[in-house]
Image: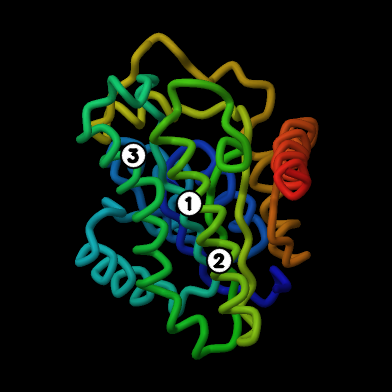
Amino acid sequence: MKISDANHAFITGGASGIGLGIADALSERGIAVTIADINSDNLDSALGARAGRFHALRLDTRDRDGWAKARAEAEGRFGPVDILVNNAGIAPDGLELADMPPESFDRVIAINLTGVFNGISAFGQSFREAGRGHIVNTASMSGMVMDGPGIGSYGPSKAGVVAISEVLRMEMEPYGVGVSVLCPSYVATNLMANTISAGGSLRDPSVSLLAAEMKPPEVGELVVRGIEANRLYIYTHLARLEAVEARFAGIMADGRAQAED
């Protein structure tokens, strides 16, 4: 999709971090932006510096009735949405699966994975009927390769986002709708604080991503370029692809070894 042809972007988790970086990158190109977020303070802060350019609304992406209301409000303000960015997410609690409270697992899956489906459910049919538009789903490099113990809810939730995006791409491509999955590594965001405000928990509350070298505006530019190129996978840290390559090499090696047994 040519960015110059887009009119209105709807971005969840859009009031801070990567979501706000994407919102700014699109707004700078003349696109009307609705930012949806569960954190009212972040919404007020983001909107205050961008008065007249953004519309802001509160949305818990787990709330399907809330999605319908949010879409109606957004399109009443700026017209039909033609770029959807399902970006809202929270961090893992850092516990190993055997020690993880079931409600913690359920919370991460509900926000990180089911929340993405809810966005697709709210807008997908209208994109298909219009025969245009682009959907970006934010996963993580942890959706491509597990980084280690303690992400037993987060990794599967993000791997699910990758899989949903791959299937959605197949389903939407015949109708002229693009689909991308954003797979960031460490980006300077307030993900940890947002996790707490969304009701999540952290094994180590002192952990922060704010000192990460890559900043949200850089990610926003990568996403814009990814949309224009209709790229399925958008990466922020290409060096991490070595770990992905090693993972798939292991998959293939075990398959070949089994074939030889």
- Amino acid type of disc 3? Val
> Residue 78 versus residue 252: which sits nearer the camera?
252
**150 lies above or below 26:** above
Q: Which comes before the other along the chain, label 2 or label 3?
A: 3
Residue at image coords 48%, 48%: 50
> Residue 74 versus residue 241: which sits nearer the camera?
241
Please name which of the two marks, 1 or 2, marks the residue nearer to the observer. Answer: 1
Q: In the drawing, what numbered circle is on residue 108?
A: 3
Residue at image coords 53%, 89%: 130
What SS does tag 3 mark? helix
Q: x, y percentage for residue 80?
A: 45, 79
Q: In the drawing, what numbered circle is on residue 135?
A: 2
Q: x, y percentage for residue 75?
A: 38, 75
Q: In the drawing, what numbered circle is on residue 243?
A: none
Please name which of the two marks, 2 or 3, marks the residue nearer to the observer. Answer: 3
- Amino acid type of disc 2? Ile
- Are circles 1 and 3 on residues that touch, CB within 8 Å? no
Any part of residue 58 in sight: no
Mark 3 neighbour class, 10 Å CA radius: few under 14, some 14 to 19, many 20 or more: many
Q: Which comes before the other along the chain, label 1 or label 2?
A: 2
**7 lies above or below 86:** below
243 left or right of 32? Answer: right
What SS does tag 2 mark? strand
Q: x, y percentage for residue 99?
A: 28, 20
Any part of residue 165 in sight: yes
- Amino acid type of disc 1? Gly
**69 lies above or below 112:** below
Residue at image coords 26%, 32%: 104
- Look at mark 1 in the image and give the residue it sits on: 160
189 left or right of 221? Answer: left
